[in-house]
Image (cartoon, rainbow, N blue to C red):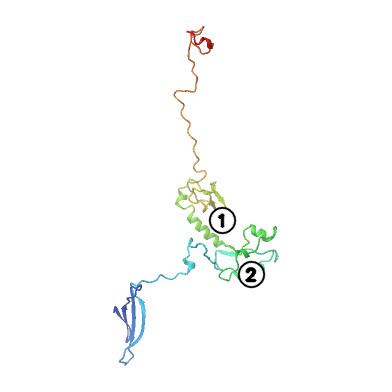
Amino acid sequence: MVEVVVEGDRVVTHLFECKEFGYRGWRWAVTVARASRAKVVTLDETVLLPGPDALLAPEWVPWSERLRPGDMGPGDLLPTDAEDLRLEPGFTGEEEPPPNSIVSHEMAALAEAEDAEVTAGSPAALPVAPARGSIAAIADELGMRRARVLSRYGLHVAADRWEETHGAKTPMAQAAPAACVSCGFLVAIGGSLGQAFGICANEFGPADGHVVSLSYGCGGHSEAAVMPKPPRPAPPVLDETRVDMLPLRPSADSGSVSLEGPSEDLGHS
């Protein structure tokens, strides 16, 4: 027996050490009581309770809160909550109802489908490409012909996340010679996020293939370091490319020797 705890008048709990594997520090609690004016003790309850040094399982956390970026693998499905604050209804209607209608019939059907845990149907069952020149075609061109699109909250949390990993306050950007907004390797993206972010296309850069802030930067900036031209060599001390005139026989007027005489005289003394 480890301990005795008095629970009240004529009620006592005896604690015994548990010997089962995996229950280190747990105790068997046996509670006994004696009724008023009774001479026999009655067994009330027996339960296994954790002690002060017991091994306890971590507090249960829902899967939606345990999930972290990168946890999904091939074949995994991640259903989104119908009330996900990062999403809001998009435009998926065709020509009916008229353009001045606030909600179309197809939107109402999609809203009902959002009440389920997983959206009904497969991507192959989604509406096909709309007719050219229709309202749905314009919505498709703007990227809105989907059941749900990013809300302002979804845009803000994505921007905050990207700014934290590839933003102006990162050590790489602080030491960069210039920002990505002037880099030739920056690929522009559409939408409102394109006003502050782009995609790096420098295979030698630390953010290749990642969304980067326009104020981010690294040493791989296209205009940061231009390949220098090879230095011009110093002029030679002895110029071996020139032809020097060597005297061979004295000339008639000055007594100097010239190379411009007839070839048949070169062998005469």
Q: Is residue 197 above or below residue 32?
A: above
Q: Is residue 43 left or right of residue 146?
A: left
Q: Which residue lies under the disc numbered 1?
A: 193
Mark 1 or mark 2: which is in front?
2
Residue 228 spot, x, y in % from top left: 49, 37
Residue nearest the observer in this picture, 220 or 124? 124
Q: Which residue lies under the disc numbered 2?
A: 109
Residue 112 spot, x, y in % from top left: 61, 71
Q: Is residue 174 above or below residue 237?
A: below
Residue occupying the far bottom of the picture: 37
Q: Is residue 49 left or right of residue 139?
A: left
Q: Residue at x 46, y 49 (%)?
A: 174
Q: CA distance from mark 1 to mark 2?
A: 30 Å
How many marks are shown on the rendered structure? 2
Residue 12 spot, x, y in % from top left: 32, 84
Kindly state the secondary structure of the residue where label 2 is placed.
helix
Residue nearest the observer in this picture, 124 or 169? 124
Mark 1 surroundings within 10 Å by alpha-carbon count, few (fewer than 14), some (14 through 19), many (20 or more): some
Q: Visible in this render: residue 261?
A: no
Q: Quadrant of residue 121?
A: bottom right
Kindly state the secondary structure of the residue where label 1 is placed.
helix
Residue 85 spot, x, y in % from top left: 55, 65
Q: Residue at x 66, y 58 (%)?
A: 138
Q: Residue at x 48, y 68 (%)?
A: 63
Mark 1 and 2 residues: CB-CB less than 8 Å, in contact?
no
Q: Is residue 142 above or below residue 51?
A: above
Three-letter amino acid code at disc 1? Leu
Three-letter amino acid code at disc 2? Ala
Q: Is residue 104 left or right of residue 165?
A: right
Q: Earlier in the sequence, mark 1 or mark 2?
A: 2
Question: What label does residue 163 carry, if any?
Answer: none
